Image: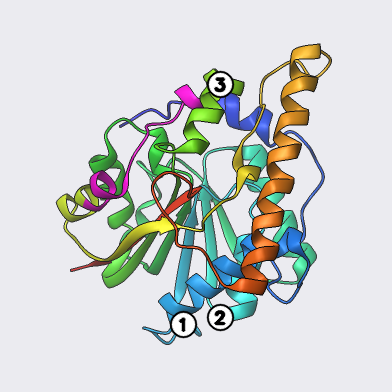
């Protein structure tokens, strides 16, 4: 079994804030919701391949997830979540309850999940999970075991090979170091080596500096305050770009600027 480079204690600290976010709502048109609306466009294209209503979807790494209610409300999936952080799992259950959405949250390591989950799901989704493991292939193979034949694996990771990674390394090296920087080609290859048919693997969005974080740094220090100001400026720059995209059209994602990589693959 692989170990998470971040570790359970790190994630428990990240999810320690008791405030629960609302579910993702693509109908909100403000700039702060721009990224969620773009993800909604992405998922709408993916799920147009299938009839999602009544099908089983699992989010692996679901701690404090605002996405599970979204998948249920927008597409009609029967949703479940899997995570090994007890704090994060309780928060995910609370978010589902607040949204009035039925769903099962399982607190377990996805390398050793309950036997009842094997081959159960039509869709498995991860946001920022596989890049925390040094052996990407074995991580993906563990996820594949949760899928039905023909099921879809949707993998989202941060693009640390461009500006996002360079700035994260500069402002908070320990957070950078708990990731394995992966590009499109290595991620695509790892999915194929895991027995999957890759349907699409590419950079996603032109910019989103809001993914940068100062987790673990002393928020009372001058250094933190300077870095926090820098990140706020960069985030406002992202919002300016999003506004321009709304007026003039979307910019092409690329290795240097894009904050994310998305990969969609099918179990054979």
Disc 2 to disc 3, C-alpha distance: 40 Å
Q: Quadrant of residue 104?
A: bottom right
Q: In the displayed structure, does residue 147 sit left or right of residue 43?
A: left
Q: Relative to 174, is 163 above or below?
A: below
Name the residue: 36% across, 33% down. 133
Write down the region rendered in magenta: 176-188
Q: Give the class, few, some or many, for how many residues have Cα within 10 Å of label 2's Cα (few <14, many ≥20).
A: some
Residue placed under numbered mark 1 in the picture: 52
The percent position of residue 265, horizontal first and vertical second, equals: 29, 64
Name the residue: 63% across, 54% down. 65
Q: Relative to 224, is 38 above or below?
A: below
- The reply to whether the C-beta atoms of the residues labelled 3 and 1 are less than 8 Å apart is no
Q: In the displayed structure, does residue 36 sit left or right of residue 49?
A: right
- Asked whether residue 181 is drawn in magenta, I would say yes
Residue placed under numbered mark 2 in the picture: 75
Which marked residue is nearer to the observer: mark 2 or mark 3?
Answer: 3
Name the residue: 15% across, 50% down. 193
Q: Quadrant of residue 231?
A: top right
Q: In the displayed structure, does residue 92 sit left or right of residue 204?
A: right
- Ranked by sequence position, the earlier of labels 1 and 2 is 1
Residue placed under numbered mark 3 in the picture: 170
Quadrant where the C terminus sits is bottom left
Q: Secondary structure at mark 1?
A: loop
Residue 260 vs residue 46, the one in the foreground: 260
The percent position of residue 124, horizontal first and vertical second, equals: 41, 62
- Ranked by sequence position, the earlier of labels 3 and 1 is 1
Q: Relative to 181, is 220 above or below?
A: above
Disc 1 to disc 2, C-alpha distance: 6 Å
Name the residue: 36% across, 42% down. 112
- Ranked by sequence position, the earlier of labels 2 and 3 is 2
- Asked whether residue 185 is drawn in magenta, I would say yes
Disc 3 to disc 1, C-alpha distance: 42 Å
């Amino acid at each position: 079994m692989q170990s998470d480079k971040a570790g359970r204690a790190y994630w428990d600290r990240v999810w320690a804030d008791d405030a629960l976010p609302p579910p993702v709502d693509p109908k909100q048109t403000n700039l702060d919701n721009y990224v969620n609306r773009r993800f909604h466009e992405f998922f709408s294209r993916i799920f147009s391949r299938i009839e999602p209503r009544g099908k089983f979807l699992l989010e692996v790494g679901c701690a404090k997830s605002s996405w599970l209610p979204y998948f249920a409300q927008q597409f009609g999936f029967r949703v479940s979540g899997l995570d090994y952080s007890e704090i994060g799992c309780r928060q995910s259950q609370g978010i589902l309850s607040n949204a009035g959405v039925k769903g099962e949250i399982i607190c377990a390591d996805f390398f050793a999940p309950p036997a009842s989950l094997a081959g159960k799901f039509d869709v498995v989704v991860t946001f920022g999970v596989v890049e925390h493991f040094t052996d990407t292939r074995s991580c993906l193979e563990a996820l594949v075991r949760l899928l039905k034949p023909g099921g879809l694996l949707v993998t989202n990771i941060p693009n640390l090979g461009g500006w996002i990674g360079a700035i994260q390394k500069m402002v908070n090296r320990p957070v950078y170091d708990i990731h394995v920087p992966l590009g499109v080609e290595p991620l695509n290859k790892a999915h194929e080596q895991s027995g999957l048919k890759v349907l699409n693997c590419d950079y996603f969005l032109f910019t989103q500096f809001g993914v940068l974080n100062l987790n673990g740094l002393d928020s009372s220090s001058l250094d933190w305050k300077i870095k926090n100001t820098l990140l706020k400026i960069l985030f406002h720059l992202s919002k300016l770009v999003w506004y321009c995209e709304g007026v003039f059209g979307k910019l092409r994602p690329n290795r240097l600027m894009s904050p994310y990589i998305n990969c969609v693959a099918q179990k054979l």
